[in-house]
Amino acid sequence: MSQTVRVRLVNPRLPDFIKPKRYEIELTLETRENIFYGECCIMIMILKATQNISLHSANLEITEVILTGKIDKYVIVVKARDISYIHELQIVVLDFSEVLCPGNYTLSITYKGVIANDGGFVKVSYVNKIGEK
């Protein structure tokens, strides 16, 4: 367990030096299989150098994380090297192999989850006007 994760266990608040600016979310529901797939792009501003980004997340399997940005004249494209879940706090910690300098970035996350009756997406049956379920 990394030092960052241990600090998160003591303090469940997310760091205040990473500011989300905009979210774009696309979901695909597979109701017959009780699964959903998602892709999100989060525009963030990093105010202090860091190697980790922490987010709230519950009952999701993150399959890919890519961070892109432009620092000075250079385009940065980095994949998360490790994804750690702190289930009791509903936090996921994304660890990158290099230090992320202050600046604007786009955090692209691909994930999947289960449609269940214990929170998140809930599957509810209903009968329409012509009696079809």
Image (cartoon, rainbow, N blue to C red):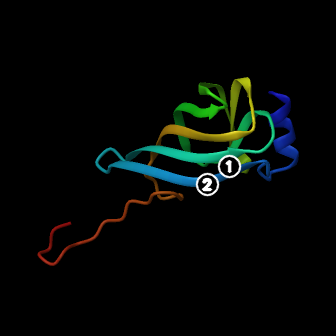
Residue 2 percent across, percent down from the top left: 81, 27
The residue nearer to you, when weighing 118 against 81, is: 81
Depth order, front residue of 32/67:
67
Can residue 46 be seen at all in this image of the molecule? yes
The quarter of the image holding the C terminus is: bottom left
Residue 131 vs 80, above or below: the answer is below
Pointer 2: what residue? 21
Q: Residue furthest front?
A: 73
Q: CA distance from mark 1 to mark 2?
A: 21 Å
| Mark 1 lies on residue | 90
Which label number is shown at residue 32?
Answer: none
Tell me residue 87's x, y (percent). Answer: 68, 44
**Left or right for 36, reference 6:** left
Density class for disc 2 (Cα within 10 Å; few <14, some 14-19, many ≥20) is few
* Amino acid type, label 2: Lys
Q: Residue at x 55, y 31 (%)?
A: 66
Question: Which residue does the image show at 87% across and 40% down from the upper left?
Answer: 7
From the top left corner, tell me how far across and down residue 49 is, in percent.
Answer: 80, 35
Secondary element under disc 1, as helix, strand or loop, is loop
Q: Nearer the viewer, residue 20 or 119?
A: 20
Question: Which callout, 1 or 2, points at the residue further toward the start of the chain?
Answer: 2
Inspect this view and state whether residue 86 appears. no
The mark lying in front, picked from 1 and 2, is 2
Q: Label 1: how many residues lie within 10 Å, few (<14), some (14-19) or many (20+)?
A: some
The answer to whether 106 appears left or right of 92 in the picture is: left
Q: Residue at x 51, y 57 (%)?
A: 120
Amino acid bearing label 1: Gln
The residue sitting at 79% across, 52% down in the picture is: 16
What is the count of numbered marks? 2
Classify mark 2: helix, strand or loop.
strand
Where, quadrant-wise, is the N terminus in this rendering?
Answer: top right
